[in-house]
Structure formats: C-alpha cells, structure tokens
Image (tube, rainbow, N blue to C red):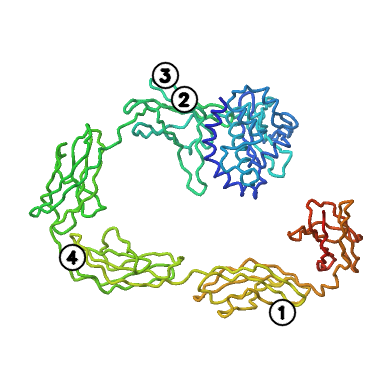
Amino acid sequence: MIKSVFKILSAIIISLVPDLIAQSDTQLIDSLKSLSAIANVKSNEIIIRWAPPNHIAWSNGNASGYKVIRYRVNFEGKKPVEETQIGNDTIKPFSLDEWKAKFPQNHNYAPIAAQALYGKQFRIGEQNFDPANIRTLSQEQELRYSFALYAADMDAQVAEGLALRVVDKNFEKDEQYLYAIIPYDRSRMDTGFVFVDTRLTTEIPKAPELEKNEMENQIELRWSIQSIQNAFTAYWIERSEDGRNWKRLNNIPYLQATQNPNQEPDEYIYYTDTTIARNYLPYKYRLIGITPFAELSEPSDVIEAMGRDRSGPQPPIITSIKDVNGKIELEWQLENPPSDLKGFMIGRSSSIGGQYEPITPQMLGTSARKYTDSNPDPIDENYYVVFAIDTAGNASVSMPAYGFLIDSIPPAKPIGLTGNIDTLGVVTLRWPLGQDPDITGYRVYFANAADHEFSNLTPYPIQDTVFVDTISLNTLTKEIFYQIAAVDRNFNHSVRSDILRLVKPDIVPPVTPLISDYLVTDTAVILKIIPSSSDDVAEHILFRKGEKQTGWTPILTLNNSSLNQTEIFDNNVTGPNYYLYALQSVDSSGNKSELSPSVGVRVRQNLKVFQIEGLNASYDNQKKVVSLTWKKPQGDLKYYVIYRKVNAGKFENFASVDPDKSSFSDSELIYQGEYQYGIKGVFSSNESQISISSPVLVK
C-alpha cells in the first residue's frame, strides 16, 4: 500500500521541487530563522507542533534534538512566572527499530517518514541523478524535508516520531502560557515560541465553501484559500449520488502545488472530477479539511453539479460570397451536422475583429445553406460570419468572410514615406495621404534586409498617416526597412511604396575584454589580455587602483593601431605595494563595456633578499620518501610553504613548515614518475620568491 501512496505523493511533491530549489539558495544565506510553531488547545490537553525553516535546520534538529519549556504568563500579576519542561529532556526522532515496532508496514505515512529520516537514498525517479552533484543532493534533502513535514501534518503519531510534536496534559485552567521550542543545535535555526490562552480552546473551522464549473464530461470544483488562513494542510473531496452515501475521490489527502513565487498567488484551490458517468447526471459534493494536527474539519455545505454539453457543432465553412446586383449573397457548408443542430444565424461587422451583430430576423432552419444580405453597407466594410447553434445553446462560428461590392481598381502607389529611430528604439513613420477618395487605411510592412520577405505589421489597415513601431536595438542587424500599401474600402491593395532604409542607433556596449594572466617584476607589471571580440571597438582603456585608493584611474589607452595587442606593460609601479587592474572597451559610438573582473597584483621590493637558497631534493628508494633540505634565511621568518609538482601537473600548495626547520620529508608518493618541489618563506612584512628544486625520479 505504501508504494502506491508514495507514488501518488511523488507526483504531487515533484511539482513543488522547482520552487523548493529556487528558494534553497536564499535559505542557505538567511538560514538562522526561528522555527515555526503552532498550538492546538483542547479541554484536557495542549498540542504543540513545530517545523524547522529549511532542510538544513531540519537535519541538524534531527541530530541534536529539541526541548520544550512552558512559561506561565500571568498578565494580572497574581501568580509568579513558572518554568516547566514538557516532554523528554531531549526530544528526538524515533530510531528505525522504534518505527518498525510502533507502526504496521502498510501504514500510510510512517514508512515515508522513516525513509526520509534513515533511507540511503530519497529521490523521485532515476533520471539525471548524480550523487556527486551538490545541487542534486540539495534536491534530495529538500524532498526528505518536504515529505517529512507533509507526513507529520497527516498523522499525529508520525509527527511525534519525527520529533515535531509534543502534548501537554498537566496544565492549569484559565491560565496563559508561552511555549518555547528550543533546538539544541541553533547554528541554523533559533528558538520558536507560541502563546496559549487555556480559556480559548482551538476550534477547527468548517471546510471552505465549494464552487463549481460544470464542464463537458467533467466537473471543476474550487474553494477559496483566503478565508481559511492556512488552517488546513490538505483535503478530502467526497462525492455522493443520493446525499447519504459518500465516496472519497482522492486516494490520498489532496494538496495543490505551490505557484511560482514571482507570480501573483491564486485565490483558489482547484480539483477536477473526471470520473463522472455522463453529462446531466447530478452529483453532490462536499469538502473536508485536514489540519496540521491531523484532525478533520466539519464537511462543507453540500453543492450539486453535473456535467453539461459544452461542445458546439463543427464550425460552418463559408464557401461563396459575392456581389449580386448590389446585394451580398453567401453560401456555406457544414460537415456532419449533429443530431441536436437547431439552426443558423448570420452576423455582420464593419471590421474583421469587430462585434458581429445578427442580421437574420430569426434563426435559419437546419437545412439552410444560403443567405442574401439585401442591405450591405455601401461605404463601410462588410464582414460576415455564420453561427451554427445546437439545442443546448452551444454555438460555433465560421471564419469571417469579406463581402465587397465589386471594385477592382486599387489605390495609387504611396509616395513620400519618411521615418526616424530614436535612442529608445521607437520608430516613427510618416507619409502624405493618397489622392484616392476610397482609401480606408494603410498597411505597414518591415524587413531586416532589403532582399528579405517583408512582414505585415498591421493586422488591419490603420486609418492614419503616422505609424509608430518599437524595435530592439540590442541586435546584430544595424538597419531596418519599411514599406507601406494603401487599402481601399473593398480591400484592394495598392502597389507597395519604395523601400525606406533606416539605420538603428548604436547603443549596444562592446564585449568586455579580460585580463587573463600577469607577471610581476621589481619595477613593472606585465598584463596578458584578451581583447574585446566586438567588431566596432575603437579603444581599450586600462584602469589601476592602489591599495589606499577608492576610485579607478585610467593609466593607458590602446587605440585602433594596437587593439590586437595581447600584453600591456605598466612600468610606473613601486614596491612594496598592492595594485588592482581592470580593462574596459569603447566602441566607435562611445558605448563603454563593463569593467573586466579586477586582477590584484602585489609588487614587492628587492625580492631576491628573501630567496630561499640551497633547496635540494633526493629520493630514498628504501624508505620510499623524498627528503628536502635548504638553508635557513635571515630575517623575521614566520613559516615556510612547500609546493609540489608531479609529472606534467602544476605546482600546488603541499605543506607548511615551522620556521626553525630546514628539512622536510615527503612520504605521500602516490604516483611513480618525476617529482619537483618549491619553497617560499613567509616573513612578517612580505614573502620570498619561490625557489625550485631539481626534479627527482620516484620508482
């Protein structure tokens, strides 16, 4: 049984994972939060429930445990403040043996909680699971945490087993208490508090009222989540045909996945019943809420709903529309007319996207396939649609058809098209009104190249001689092209105007260059750079900032003749000192890139004074160790740093040695081959250069 429950829960909880993971980084940053706590006050007991703020705090709390302290809070001052421990001194989750002993194997929630606590793995599905990936492991811990809290809400004994619940039965009536839930490990969460007035017992609110949406072959139920204020964790949805015998529609308590935190929260929870037998069969529904204390609410008021026929007939297809002696005659066809077809209506509008008003005085019969409009508008546009309507009132509509009185002469070709683009990407086009008296508007076309196919920007002709377009300036194309065409009242289109070419303002900054490496001498800093890849770069600027400076200072500009230079020399440095360097590119329009990531460089004075001399490396084949010796330098030496390189690898920081030593033995010879060592002395005021030994061969 638990496998089927876990499978259903997986489908629910997996929808929560993206939100949980999206929030996990924030939780890691702002992890020291108080745990959340609530109380359920009854006449003979007070139940305290709590939850850690995130999966890291939950894991720490499981390991260290909690204690619960009750404080008497007497507002009238008649009794002293009293401190009482509730439950064990250390409240921790059940051991695995306790879970097995206290719960049957087919329990709905205990195996899930035990698996979340002690399972070697806890994940939904196997796809893309990489146990070495930190994000994957974070997802797994989020799932353990989410499933555990869900199981605690659904079963009181499971909540106790998860160390998230305690019951206080030894309290005084008519008193006020403050309960403190104190985690022993407070590195990730702080103490949670909940106030209780024993004179006010907790009332379980009635389940929220149901609303219905009767659809075809299914019924959508919804209920408001605003009025219940998080009183319920999940719900049972029940259905009855006679109002006496009720059946639960969900196998496990129903909860709705959280929404994207960037979206406005929905005011409702939705559930769709797709198991109804047929349309127009009435059903009764009610809702039961489940509190975080695993208690059931009083059922909501019963509502009645049924599936309804919501499918209209197939849309008619207008097959012919023509001018017949100044009247518009249209014909249509309807494939496979339904048995419940009631008839047809004809609608007309002056625009293709406008409101279509019925022009048939009464509904046409089911056999009608032709209609003549005796009074079409002689000046305005005439668009027609055909509605097919069934006996349930469902209607379908044909695609619009344009009925025109015969006029085959298009307007003249537009002339005088001009335009400009501002720095915000707003394009303004202007042209003079044409001389044709029946012009009703213009269409505007654009393309990114003069030889490309032009696209229509105006779904319907605009009745103006000014058109405003908005384009993105952050593109690779530097130009945009426009044309216009005049349209008369019979939808005759003129020849398009000459092509207008407009140049986009350049506001796109160039690609940021990079400092890839550096070399430091006593008198100069040599920076290796990767120039900007933008094709319109005019110059690179090198900035420098000293250790005590707050702002950047430009010290060198590379112009067009030296843009491909890959090394920059700064000869104006003195030591000892610390400098930061950054690069910026500037294009031909003056747009500047972001500063490159800064590189810190320390220039030292007379480095050779601190050179460690006499470094020697030798391999002892019997003892399998490499021995290093060197001469101890003069000065206030703090410690040595040993570096090691194996075969073709890089020198890596390997060990540190006390300043009174002049030898070191390396016994960590994992690989055979060539080993080479370096040593650096760290003094109170500076560091020496790294001395490199001769390579030794380890067999």
Q: Quadrant of residue 612?
A: bottom right
- Please, is residue 462 above or below residue 104 in the view? below
**Residue 8: image location, x then y, percent:** 52, 32
In percent of the image, x 62 and y 38: which residue is there? 145
Taking the image as shown, residue 224 lies to the left or right of residue 412, namely: right
Say few, some or many: other residues with alpha carbon within 10 Å of mark 1 (under 14 / 14 to 19 / 20 or more). few
Q: Quadrant of residue 282?
A: top left
Earlier sequence position, callout 1 versus callout 4: 4
Q: Label for residue 69?
A: none
Q: Label for residue 410?
A: 4
Q: CA distance from mark 1 to mark 4?
A: 75 Å
Q: Nearer the viewer, mark 3 or mark 4?
A: 4
Q: CA distance from mark 2 to mark 3?
A: 13 Å
Q: Amino acid at mark 4?
A: Pro
Residue matched to label 1: 572
Q: CA distance from mark 3 to mark 4?
A: 73 Å
- Please, is residue 144 above or below residue 614 in the view? above
Q: Amino acid at mark 3?
A: Arg
Q: Amino acid at mark 1?
A: Asn
SS at badge 2: strand
User: Does the CB distance between marks 4 and 2 fall below 8 Å?
Assistant: no
- Closer to the camera in the image, 656 or 397: 656
Q: Label for residue 244?
A: 3
Q: CA distance from mark 1 to mark 2?
A: 82 Å
SS at badge 1: loop
Q: Nearer the viewer, mark 1 or mark 3?
A: 1
Q: Amino acid at mark 2?
A: Arg
**Residue 506: image location, x then y, percent:** 46, 72
SS at badge 4: loop
Q: Label for residue 248?
A: 2
